[in-house]
Image (cartoon, grey):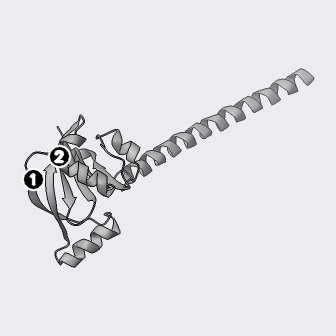
C-alpha cells in the first residue's frame, strides 16, 4: 500500500514537472520572440558607439562626438562625426580627390548644434564641402562621401555598400 502511494505521488510530481517545464519553455520562446521584435523596432535608432561603427567602416582619428545610423535594407550608413580641430584639418588635407560644395538636409537625430545651424540658414540644410570617403572605406561599405560642415569640425559620412 505504501509502495502504491509512493508511485502515485511520484507519477503526479513527474507530470507536474513536465507540464511546468513545457510552459516555461513556451515563455522563454515567446520572450525571445519579443526581444527579436524589440531589436527590430530599435534597429534604426541612432547609435553613439564608435567601436561598433568602427567594425563597419574605418575611422582614421578618434572622435569627440559621434552619432550614426545604419540602414541595412539600403546598404547605407549615415554618421555625424566631430573631430578635434587638428584632426579635422588633417582629415580634410588627407582626403584628396575632387571636392565639391554640398548641401545636406538635417534629420531629427542630428546633434543639436547642427540642427540649430541648419535652421539659421533658413532652408533646414547644412552647407559644406564634400570629399571622397576613401579613408573610411571598408567592405562592404566601400563607396561614399565625407562632407565637412561649414564653419565646424563636424563631418557627415555617407557610406554605401555594394
Above or below: residue 116 compared with residue 41: below
Above or below: residue 126 compared with residue 100: below
For the N terminus, the image quarter is top right
Q: Residue at x 9, y 53 (%)?
A: 99
The quadrant in which residue 129 appears is bottom left
Above or below: residue 114 compared with residue 12: below
Give the image location of residue 117, x and y in percent. Answer: 25, 72
Marks 2 and 1: CB-CB under 8 Å?
Answer: yes
One can see residue 1 in this view: no
Q: Identify the mark at residue 14; answer none if there is no mark.
A: none
Q: Which residue is mark 2?
A: 95
Q: Is residue 124 left or right of residue 42?
A: left
Give the image location of residue 3, x and y in percent. Answer: 89, 21
Q: Which residue is mark 1?
A: 99
Who is closer to the viewer here, 73 or 8?
73
Q: Is residue 89 left or right of residue 18?
A: left
The quadrant in which residue 85 appears is bottom left
For the C terminus, the image quarter is top left
Amino acid at each position: 500500500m505504501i509502495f502504491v502511494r509512493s508511485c502515485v505521488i511520484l507519477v503526479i510530481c513527474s507530470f507536474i514537472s513536465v507540464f511546468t517545464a513545457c510552459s516555461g519553455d513556451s515563455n522563454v520562446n515567446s520572450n525571445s520572440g519579443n526581444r527579436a521584435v524589440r531589436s527590430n523596432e530599435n534597429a534604426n535608432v541612432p547609435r553613439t558607439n564608435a567601436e561598433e561603427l568602427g567594425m563597419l567602416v574605418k575611422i582614421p582619428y578618434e572622435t569627440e562626438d559621434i552619432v550614426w545610423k545604419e540602414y541595412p535594407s539600403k546598404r547605407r550608413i549615415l554618421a555625424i562625426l566631430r573631430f578635434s580641430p587638428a584632426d579635422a584639418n588633417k582629415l580634410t588635407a588627407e582626403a584628396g580627390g575632387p571636392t565639391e560644395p554640398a548641401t545636406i538636409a538635417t534629420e531629427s537625430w542630428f546633434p543639436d548644434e547642427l540642427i540649430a545651424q541648419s535652421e539659421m540658414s533658413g532652408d533646414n540644410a547644412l552647407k559644406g564641402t564634400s570629399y571622397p570617403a576613401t579613408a573610411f572605406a571598408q567592405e562592404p561599405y566601400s563607396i561614399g562621401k565625407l562632407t565637412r560642415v561649414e564653419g565646424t569640425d563636424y563631418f557627415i559620412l555617407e557610406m554605401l555598400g555594394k
